[in-house]
Amino acid sequence: MSFRACRGISYIFLLLLTSCELPFDLKTLGDRDMLKLYCEVVSGDTTVLDMDVLVPVGYHERTPVKVGPEDVVMTVDGKEVEIRVAADDDPNLEPGTLYVRENFPAGSQMCVKASIEGADPIEAKTVMPLHLDDYRLEMQLTDIVSGSYNGDNVRDMVRARLILPEVAEGTHVGIQYVVRHKTDSCGVTLFDEQVLQAVYDVTEFSSDGNLVAGVDFSNLTRLGATLTYVWNATDEYEFLFRHLTDSVSEWKDENGETVTWSSDYHFKFRIFALSEEYYQYHSRTTNEFFELGMASPSYTYTNVHGGTGMFGAISVAETPWMDDDLFGSDGTAGKEEK
Amino acid sequence: MKRILFIFILAFLPLAVHAGPDKTLKSQMEVIHEIFGVNFVYDSSLDLDRIAGRAGNDVVKKTANDILSSRHSRLDRESLEACLAALFKDTGIDYEIMKKYIVLTKAGSKKKPKDYTIFIEEQRDTIDESRITAIIDRRRNAAQTGLERIDASAFKRGFASLSAPDVLKTLQAVTGVSGGTELMNGLYVHGGTGNDNLYLYDGVPVYSVSHLAGLYSAFNTDVVDNVNFFKSGFPASYGGRLSSVVEVNTRDGSMTDYMGSFTIGLINGSVQYEGPIVKDRTSFNVAMRRSWLDVLTVPGLAIYRAMKNNSSDPYNDQMDARYAMTDFNAKITHKVAADNVLRFGVITGRDVVKFAHRIIRSDVGDDYRFRWGNVVGYADWQNVIADDLHYDLKAYYTQHRSRMNWDKVRETRYERLPDLKESWLTGIYDIGLKLDFDQQLTDVHRLRYGAEHVFHIYRPEQSWSTADLSSGLMSASYFGTETAFYAEDEMTLGEKVTASVGLRDVLFGVKGRVYNRLEPRVALSYRPSDLAALKVSYTEMNQFSHRLVTSYLDLPSSVWLPSTARVAPMHSKQVAAGIYMTLPFNLQIDLEGFYKTMDHIREYKGYRIFPPIENWERTFAEGKGRAYGMETSLVYNTVSTHAALNYTLSWSERFFEDLYPEWFPDRLDNRHRLNVSVSHRFSKRFEIYAGWNWHSGDRFTVESQYLPSDDQFYNENLFTSPNNVKMPDYHRLDVGFNFHKTTKRGNESIWNLSVYNLYCRMNPIVVYTYTENGKPISAAAGMVPIIPTFSYTLKFKQ
């Protein structure tokens, strides 16, 4: 074989070895637009219908049409409800946003249908979950090191156990721990509300109330970045949250004057009941193996037939703001009940 | 010329004829084969290792000598019949000459030779195949559809993936089977999940069948005798999985001779040895394999470490990494009598991955060890009670276990922290007892019936950790009992029709729940002629043990869990029908269709590498699947050439409400699949294999919709449906060459050179999208290039 032929074959071989990528035409994914609906129905409040028109990735330069109220129909228990459009002066709503202002009792069957030219019509359904009118919250301060309160003012954790009455099997219940921090030094409010994550292991109880086993809290479904911990209502869960202690600090400034800084923390819990669709959509996580082509992604959930997105419902209950005065010398709190 | 060659061969016959004082029937059959060029066909239950009678020996010897002395100018049927009559006189063995084949049956047997379609494979030029092997192809006569029987020689036709012939990679070429991720031992049969195949090793279930994440199968082909592969039409004696049964049967050790082989390959080696413990009564067969990737990496890393040790960098670190695989097979066969055989077997397999990282000056670092593997042990008793009734009693133990240990030495700037140790263990352990009867009740009815009881211990997770502030043991265990009864009647309804009607009843008990499932198994075969058969079958299968995986790779982090009160058993229904024909010119063609549904299958919907055991029932979505299609197989077979063209047209879909509200394509919804292979033996010294695989691209999930925004940084690509994209088609060419040589000591050496993916097509395994200048771009990427491997095998006989 001649030298030139050897060299040619070598070049071909090198090209083959380095050609790890093949072009992929995104236009093969289709050319139809798609409707995206994102809607969290919250009882007794404004419900925003976030409607977008998605264009195919292969035709990204296309300008999608806008969705107007005439394109959307929402019914509750078979009756049509009025869909409004936010005006320029509507508070907390962007102009042009579609919304509904209705009260949805537990068990309400809700349905949204929409259609525009160039995209498939969509239909999505959900059911309003039960309202958590009755609950009991047992709280105790505890020491992060020893696991029990010993009265030495080292109170880093609040242990919260949520006890619900008889609820429907399969109801998804969630909890958020919200903290507010005020200071009277210069009258500055550092933050009105901040959701803190659960710090430590949660504990699962058996049906007779005895401790079963330590459970890593990361196994509990956490809804994305909302730091809402969700579990099935037939289980009882106990949570540990970081407790921020009221404090007073003094120091001398450059003029020798005493500066007093006092921190005043308050906390409360938000308790949710989620519809199945809401839970499924927000509990999606990315399987890391997917990036290597070694697993399926798990974030394609939708209950919007013909489109994408989520149409779900959520009911919310809140405790009032609480502070350290709630706890006795043994760290036990009065039981918050509603 | 032919006569001269023949005489040259026969010149050695006196050595064979006179070799040793005791000639067995089999050795005399070899002589007859050499003289007359005929091939013997027989059922393996015939005792051919028995010593031949003196009269038979004399006739064979005289015939051989007469030919050498040219007293017989031509070889005729009369001489052949004289040899056969003398050899098999008073042995209880009947013979029938059918052109070039001599069919042997037990005297008075109800099975008539004309019912058999004969396929012979002869390895006359290799030592371990000097005895004639015969495979009786019952595909056209059994009522079941979807049966493939593969002889051990098929694994050694010339291609060795990564220098080792592989059972599962051979099965991937069968119609209706997808191999999944490239280079891996996936077996996705008729739209199955890959975790729903029953692997039996000498009748014992094996849970993990791969080494190194699926690069090697756990079956050592040095000891494999044959493989039965069922895709549909499952007999009632099999159960517990949805999609397929892979029954790997190992070879009994030779009762007369000591022989073996050893192989040195590019990344592994193997040794096999067999022989009699008590001649003609008890034999052994042992084999072992080991990889030596660590032999290559360990010295390399040692040199690297030595070089880094000289560095003055205070944070200079060292690394050590190694991987090793070993497996071991041992089998003892004891013949209590001709029809009464005891077998004892042990199979172990083990993979080890070690990784260590250290900061030299401070000794801070990690030690990581991952070990996984199988252990199988069994005792088997096969006995013939009467001519028409025999049974098989088997007791077994099988386990699969994975263990991970992680030790971390830590420090801050000021102090040394307590060492962190973590341990994680998962395993499944079975103890089973199985009794099978096979009874030829009448000429029409052949009954198979029996029972199996298995006690399962599932230990999906035992973990232990010394974290900063706490330590504790996390453990989860389940226990399950599985009891199955089955009965099946294979009816011969005249000359043309065979029907098999069976029922399997399975009871699976776990804490809080007992499942009782009935599984009908029906098959019908109609043979309009000796050359064709039409078949149809219907089967239902249930699977009570679930293998939960978090990726497509066969990782040791997957766990086995039982059906529970919340998790129903998986269930499948399958109907299959086909036409099977023998054509002129050594051609066979099969055309088969299937439709299969699956319920209660599982898909992981989380993110962790190690599946979460707490609340596992909720982190895995439950759904359905369906698959249907048509398969065509055209095979050409002669003594020296085997060619096959296998084509499959199929659809495979899934429905998981937790993932998507509509049916969506399965990842391996490959519409077309074609496999063309040829192996040819040019001479006793050289054979070649070539195989071309092509299939429609796998499915993948890609963002398909784009949400434009006025803010250029907020444009978003969205996933809208699973497996919405078909990747580019997959195709590759593999070739293999075997160079045979006889050594000076009369042993046989084989050099194998195999090339995987000869033209180096980088078949895509992932599609990804990204944005460039605001424009979505997509590409499909692959990573498996051309892989040449070689191995050297020496076969010896003492």
Image (cartoon, coloured by chain):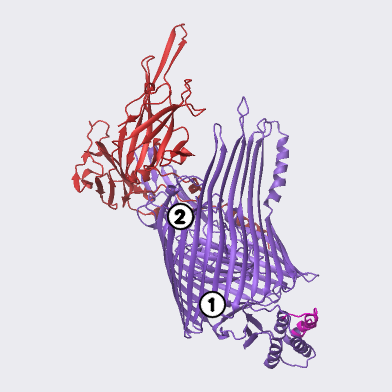
Chain colours: A red, B purple
In the rendered image, residue A118 lying in the magenta stretch gets the answer no
In the rendered image, residue B18 lying in the magenta stretch gets the answer yes
- Left of B388 or right of it: where is B534? left
Give the quadrant of residue A242: top left
Give the quadrant of residue B712: top left
Q: Position of residue A95 (x, y in %)?
A: 25, 35
| Mark 2, residue position | B563
Q: Position of residue B729 (x, y in %)?
A: 48, 60
Give the quadrant of residue B128: bottom right
Q: Secondary structure at mark 2?
A: loop
Q: Nearer the viewer, residue B339 or B634?
A: B339
| Mark 1, residue position | B439
Q: Nearer the viewer, residue B657 or B725?
A: B657
Is B652 drawn above or below residue A104 in the view shown? below
Q: Which residues are magenta?
A: B6-24
Asked if the residue under mark 1 is in contact with the one under mark 2, i.e. CB atoms within 8 Å, the reply is no
Q: Amino acid at mark 1?
A: Gln
Q: Secondary structure at mark 1?
A: strand
Binning the other alpha carbons within 10 Å of mark 2 as few (below 14), some (14 to 19) or many (20 upward) gives many
Q: Nearer the viewer, residue A163 or A307?
A: A163
